[in-house]
Amino acid sequence: MAEPDAVQTFEDGLTKIRGAYEQALRDATDEPELRLVNGRYVGPQGELTKLLKLMPKLPGDRRRELGQRANALKQEIQTTFDVVLDGIHRRARDAELTGPSLDVTLPGRWPMPGRLHPITRIRNEVLEILVSLGFDVADGPEIELYENCFDKLGFPPDHPATDEHDTFFIEGGKPSGPHSVLLRTQTSTIQVREMSRREPPLAIVSPGAVYRRDDDATHSPMFFQLEGFLVDTDVTFAELKGVLTLFLRRLFDEHVAVRFRASYFPFVEPGGEVDMSCVFCRAWEGDKERTTACRVCKGNGWMEILGCGMIHPVVFENVGYDPEKYTGFAFGMGLDRIAMLKYGIPNIKLLYDNDVRFLSQF
Amino acid sequence: MLTSFRWLQELCPIEADVREVAHRITQAGLEVEAIEEKGANLSGLVVAEVRTRAPHPKRDKLTLVTVFDGEAEHEVVCGAPNVPEPGGRILFARPGTILPNGLRIEPRKIGGVESSGMICSEAELEVGADAEGIFIVDAENEALPGDEVADALDLHDFILDIGLTPNRPDCLGHVGIAREVGVLFGKRCEPRRAAGPRRTFAAGASFQADQPTTDLVPSWDGESEPVDAPALPSISIEIADGDRCPRYGAALVSGVRVGPSPFWLRYRLHNLGLRTLSNVVDATNLILLEWGHPIHGFDLNRLRGSKVVVRLARKGETMATLDGIQRTFTADDLLICDGEGPVAVAGVMGGADSEIRDDTKDILIECAYFAPRSIRRTSRRLGLQTDSSHRFERGVDPEAVPRVLASAASLIAELGEGASATTAIDRVAMAYSPKSISFRPARAAGLLGTPIETEESQRILEALGCRLIEKTDSAFTLEAPSWRPDLGREVDLIEEVARVRGYDEIPTAVPRVRPSESGTPEVLRFISALRTAAVTAGLYEAVNYAFLSVEELQKARVSTDVVALANPLSEDRSAMRTSLMPGLTGAATRAQRHGATEVRLFELARTFHPSDDILPREDTTLAIVLAGDRSGWIGGDRPFDFYDGRGLVEAILDRVIGQRSDFTPGEVPEFMHPKRSAIVSLAAREVGFVGEIHPDVGDALELHGRVVYAEIDVAALHVVTEELGTPQGHALPKFPAVTRDIAMLVREEFTAGEIATALSEASGGLAESVHLFDLYRGDQIPEGQRSLAFRVTYRDPESTLTDKRVDKAHAKVAEVARDRFQATIR
Ligand SMILES: [Zn+2]
């Protein structure tokens, strides 16, 4: 049933809203306030919403017309709302674009950082070069038989050549002889192991921990070596020189000079040691004064870097290769020493202290 | 081996300077590690003549001396007891001179008397060890006042410190190094043949012995000085073990006067690092340094029974060596004995009873060749390394015995003003036979990778002392010289040729490396990937020593079934680790001690375990430790706990394996927290554990706070990867998923993991995933319960899901939650 007052109320309502909404919306300074104000008109409890709820009470002949007006008003409010909201967003964006900068000096949010140990790092660098030259990587036990560490590598029994290998022996094993058990003193054991189970051609590098009974300012009782060797028909000393020169230049600097001189290791012959021009005073640049003052090479411009040679026929005989058919070369280096040279590490003990202040430098 | 450059020049006169010689021998394998110039730091020091000598007016022990330095007289106060008479010459430091030790001589008052300058001792000039008195210039020296000391005393020299490799015993004496220098500089440098004794017994007296003898005057071309002959004793020499002592020679010098050595000898020994003792002992040392062949002098009158026997010791036999220590021998030790018992440890050290003393008159000089292994074993067993054992164990020249004896007898007779017998006993139990070696120039060229003229090879090898026996087109046969025990087969000669020419002469070539069939084992790449993953996940890599003490293992409650070292450096490092845990947590403890607030470390290394095989078992393990606080963004730090460890393990395994790992309660090692640890498995295989360290163990290890620890068994993990194979790609789903949430109150004893698994199974295969997105305990939640909310994602890969199917499946899911876990669905 229609109420004549209802029309009046409705019309008054529309008039009141129409007169007020625009200013009210435009007065809002931010989005929440705008939405609050907007809600006062078109929200569930809003004035316009309430009017619309009166629709059924309107007389039939006016209902349609009033309804259209109310909806039109609602549309106008929405339009105004959108315009005002756009304005607010624009102002906010302009304010951010023209206002003070973010404090970019505050820390970033990191995933947790970590680092490889310098020995792993140098091992990776060394392996990357040698593997790219065609060498395979191999591995062997750190606790070894005497024969694999010495006899089969051509160390004569009771010979001073073992003096540099002050060896840790395992308790309970045979106290002496080929089957006594020890901590390997060199990664050259890999030569024996790999040659005993494979046939040439072989090109192998093997990094790993080795142990000697030395503990002073420059020696650590455990340290890391890398052994490399190549066996095939017609392998020459010239190729040994080629591989090691290339290797050192790639690892340190393409300009380093490399010098081979005679030396002695029981399992190679001819045997040699390799010196490289000092990387601290950059001796290859020929700045005499800088080299003279260099404390690392003691002014002579060279540093000892690795040992090498042609695999001794006695090693081939011990693993059952025919030394007339095959030749090969081998080389070995201390990874600790190379890491110290390459990364300028002043003291070998730092490598085994595991102090994060040190580990985080690499 | 300290080497006098002057001495080398005397033995092999060449033009090259010391640097060039050092460079060439270094390249050839005799590494010169240092060069020290001698006589260069004495500028300003001069010879001066004593003019007057008077007691100091106030001080008893001081003398006032006026010296003339060639230009002026100086008055000096001298504290030495041996100021010579006027006319005597001394060494004088004028005011302003700087002594080798850096001290600057200034005029100063001593006991009220002005002293301008200093009269020096040997020690002050660092030309000898004598600090007792001042140096007095020998009467035979023609130096004049004002002559520089270094010139007047002939002090100029360079001392090379050569690091000799053990294959070159021939270079343990100056003769051998000079020979090497001669070869390298292309100079035929046959060391002067040793002169036989100049002072000999009248009538050429020789040993009265029924023994093979050798003539000691082969090359002396001057006049001998006959000395009155005492009655020469008869000495017999017996070698009871010819394998260990193939050759034993003995010379006799009689009537010596033991006293100080002349300056030139003391100076030379001083520069070469030996103490001077007496003329006779110094002479034996000089011979050692000259020939590289140890000799030993016995006081003839203290040898009992007129005989020398070289034999093995009887077990338990004893003798005092000349260092005063009573030694006990085994049946493996070779002894030199007289008629009654041992008088020397062969090749190692003489006995105290028969050593040369101040009153020694007659000396039996021993020069022998002992088998290297025998000497080494004895020297090792006795812990007695001497200049003598060092040379014998490397191998002296067996053929040098007569020459060395001649040199020694000559020098001792000369210095001791005694006389030598003109012959020596030379007993050979086993004759030396040279090794003959065939050398193929083609083989040398093939091995070195460069052609070498056959003539050049031959010239080098002959210069080194090899004797050509036979020569064909393709090979020649040579005999190696007796002083090179290291030359035994062809490759040894190839090395000689290569090193004398210089390795620089060999070109460089890069080989074509033929690939092997097997390549690098997969597990090594896998280990490398694990390290990278651990670093990427936020860990620093540690490297610990592989040995520690059993006590540390006990404290950490890890296995003490260890592989122990028989000869550890210390108790601290006497057992191989059975676990990475003590080492890695040790690093954490030290870091905390340094004040580190956050410790994140891993180690990937081996542990060692006794096994039934001859070699112990070596396991490779990845271990992780987290301690302290995990740092947040500007504050917001919070202590590490189990979930940080689990997350790290998941991240690492996900990166390496590409699969989610499972964490279940289970039996973890004793050192782990029983309630805050889990077993890690992958594809239903156990691969490790993670959790917090047992708080009692943490206390024992002096760790602070909760410490998270995890271990992954690399071998087990590698097996899983092999089983899982390579990841395979799948098409993306075609039909949309529907998600429904289910929240429940459930008792603490049910794990979120088992509930999620049950919910998934209850969905009749429709649940693609069940994801825990909320967990709440506290207000409004009954004691012993927690609120869990899961989001279940439903998908049918074959069709679009209807609401009805999802409702039905979700109702089943809720039913299981209620029935199996007595959950209250919220
Ligand atoms: Zn340098």
Image: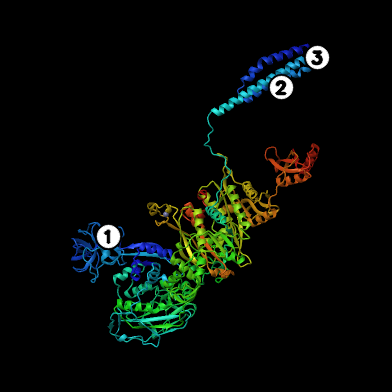
Looking at the image, which residue sits at the far front? B473
Whether label 2 touches label 1, CB < 8 Å: no
Give residue A108's quadrant in the image. top right
Identify the image quadrant of the N terminus of chain B.
bottom left
Residue A45's label in the rendered image is 2
Q: Secondary structure at mark 2?
A: loop
Q: Amino acid at mark 2?
A: Gln
Precedes in sequence: disc 2 or disc 3: 2
Per the rendering, the mark at residue B43 is 1
> Which element is circle 3 on?
helix
Amino acid at circle 1: Ser
Label 3 packing within 10 angstroms: few (<14), some (14-19), many (20+): few
Nearer to us: label 2 or label 3: 3
Q: Assess mark 1: CB under 8 A from ligand 1? A: no
Query: How many marks overall?
Result: 3
Q: Which percent across, then down, holds residue B570?
A: 51, 62
Q: Is residue B539 left or right of residue B366?
A: right
Q: Nearer the viewer, residue A46 or B823?
A: A46
Q: Position of residue B235 (x, y in %)?
A: 38, 85
Bin the neighbour count of mark 2 within 10 Å (Cα to Cα): few under 14, some 14-19, many 20 and up: few
Q: Closer to us: mark 2 or mark 1?
A: 1
Report how far apart the C-alphas of labels 3 and 1 lie in the structure. 133 Å
Residue under label 3 = A60
**CB atoms of marks 2 and 3 within 8 Å:** no
Residue drawn at x 76%, y 11% as measured from the top left: A5
Do circles 2 and 3 both sit on a common chain? Answer: yes
State whether label 2 is within 8 Å of ligand 1.
no
Classify mark 1: helix, strand or loop: loop
Is B451 situated above or below B603? below
Instruction: State which chain disc 1 sits on.
Output: B
